[in-house]
Amino acid sequence: MAHFLPITLDEVKRLGWTAVDVVIVSGDAYVDHPCFGAAVLGRCLEDAGFRVAIIPQPNWRDDLRDFRKFGAPRLFFAVTSGCMDSMVNHYTAARRLRHDDAYTPGGQAGFRPDRATYVYSRLLKQLYPSVPVVIGGIEASMRRLAHYDYWDDRLFPSIMVDTPADLLTYGMGERLTVRMAQMLDSGASLEELQALPQQVFRASLDWLEDFRRQPRTRVLHSFAECLKSKRAHAENFHFIELESNKVECDMLVQPYDDCIVVVNPPDAPFTEAELDHSFDLPYMRQPHPNYKKRGAIPAFEMIKFSVNTHRGCFGGCSFCTISAHQGKQVVSRSEESILREVDKIVQQPDFHGTLSDLGGPSANMYRMGGRNRELCRRCTRYSCIHPSHCPNLDSDHTHLTKLYQRVAAHPGVKHLFIGSGIRYDLFTQQNGGFDYFRQVVTHHVSGRLKVAPEHTSPTVLEAMRKPSFDLFVRTKRDFDDICRKAGLRYQLIPYFISSHPGCRLGDMAELAVEMKRLGYRLEQVQDFTPTPMTLATEMYYTGINPATMKPIYVAVHPNEKREQNLLFFYYKRELHPQIKQALLKSHNGQYLNKLGIR
């Protein structure tokens, strides 16, 4: 019989359980849907025969009754901050507190602590010192080694140094979490679990020399060295990224004052059958009914009628964590699995025929990858498409156009829209990309199509690892041509970032001039926010590009970041005095006439 995973003791008793095998503690409200990590983890463990309960958004300020309600699980606690890093969830790029939380009923803020993974794991070890605590999810994954923290503006050690957690599973961890549960259930020790791939653990400093002698092991600069030298930290990141780009990676070891942190190589990517199975599990596809009186969960409302087609991204953008977390190798679902999910969606009583999205991290990477997988095993490129397309990349779009046609033909679907970002730098004459684009524009756009050129400056785009802005201009021309021939009055909406490493105020002025020339009044913009374990963040902190080890300009001062952001809104007359002052002060007065600012 279909059911939610229990989040209360009464639900556990109704299931007839006397104990719980694994308790998942999450910073998000519990939504039983394959787009929410705690639900995926719980359903995979349940499918393997384990009794799983979830503690969503526990109160960490009171007598800790939420943490106590199920008692000690038989095997372990699994801890995650939720679908977002809790600091990104809480604060803007200007370090101002946000007043809402998309992963909480009613969008209310304040239901998770700052650095949720740290707080939850410490409280659990305080209450249950002998029960293993395994941390995972985006917050733990991206903080697995020394990293710059924008909100404290300093270098942090690995999260495994600052928390009492026993293990960290990085990346997409459901396969490994099930395997860990099975091993512990069979009597394995925590030390035996340390041998599993994709695990991070603390070890004695006495082991350091042993690791140095092991093949396929890279010892990084110590945390103490990184505190003294930003160059040492930049060198570390270069090696970390290099290893994360490989199919077969080396083990990474970082020394600290009283321990070492060991990062095992990742596990093999999921197969299509494994990914299908994960999505086919019996999700209720709704928030837990306990939330009904508290209001809708915005993150769920956004994706409730969307379908995820694949994982991973080979784009390699400097500011993005997707490839570092989900992997560079794209793993796609079968068409049959996707259509089974569509069948479930159209049966929902509040579905009225419109699918809001059919995509993934990048909508049009479905079924793409290396033609010769043996060449991929030896590859160390950070991107398959930048600075040029890899000749081994199969970027055929026909799989996707056929999938769209099959889904659109479903008798319960009236409209299929594509809401995920489209990589227009994947289009070539040979791979069906332009036919794909024509199909999207004429059949799968609700009036506005969003794309992400990110900037106009060649210098900034190179730092971002994004293609030339000329490619966006070509895409806009193609878009307008398709719309004109089809009699459509649609808009192509570009997305831009200010204050990215490499960007000066003059670069933003050039962007504003280009937008004025193209007739844009921008809406989709943001100020760059450094998040752990991205190339852009390391450039921001060190002032060095780890890929080249050369200095790079960084706008660090809040006033300069604000001035760069102002130029997005060159068309607002009330901002002209501030923009004029910023341009004159930075010796960029030549742009005033071009922008119509007196």
Image: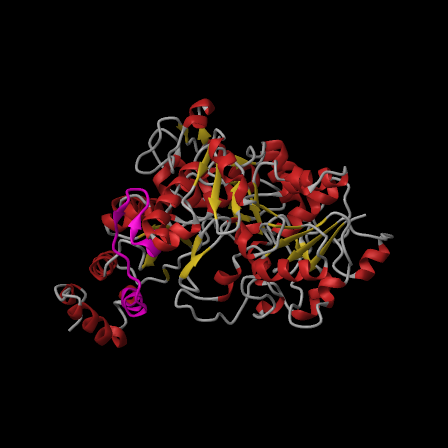
Residue plotted at (69% across, 48% down): 42
Q: In which quarter of the image is the C terminus?
A: bottom left
- Give the percent coordinates (x, y) of residue 30: 66, 58
Looking at the rendering, the stretch of residues picked out in magenta corresponds to 539-566
Whether residue 563 appears in magenta in the rendering, the answer is yes
Q: Can residue 3 be seen in this view?
A: yes
Residue plotted at (62% across, 44% down): 342
- Give the percent coordinates (x, y) of residue 250: 47, 33
Left or right placement of residue 279 versus residue 391 in this view: right
Is 495 located above or below residue 426 in the figure?
below
Is 274 located above or below residue 234 in the figure?
above
Indicate the quadrant where residue 190 lies: top right
Left or right placement of residue 502 versus residue 255 in this view: left
Name of the residue lying farthest toward the front: 206
Which one is in front, 418 or 412? 418
Which one is in front, 231 or 570? 231
- Give the percent coordinates (x, y) of residue 103: 58, 61
Indicate the quadrant where residue 428 lies: top left
Which one is in front, 209 or 596? 209
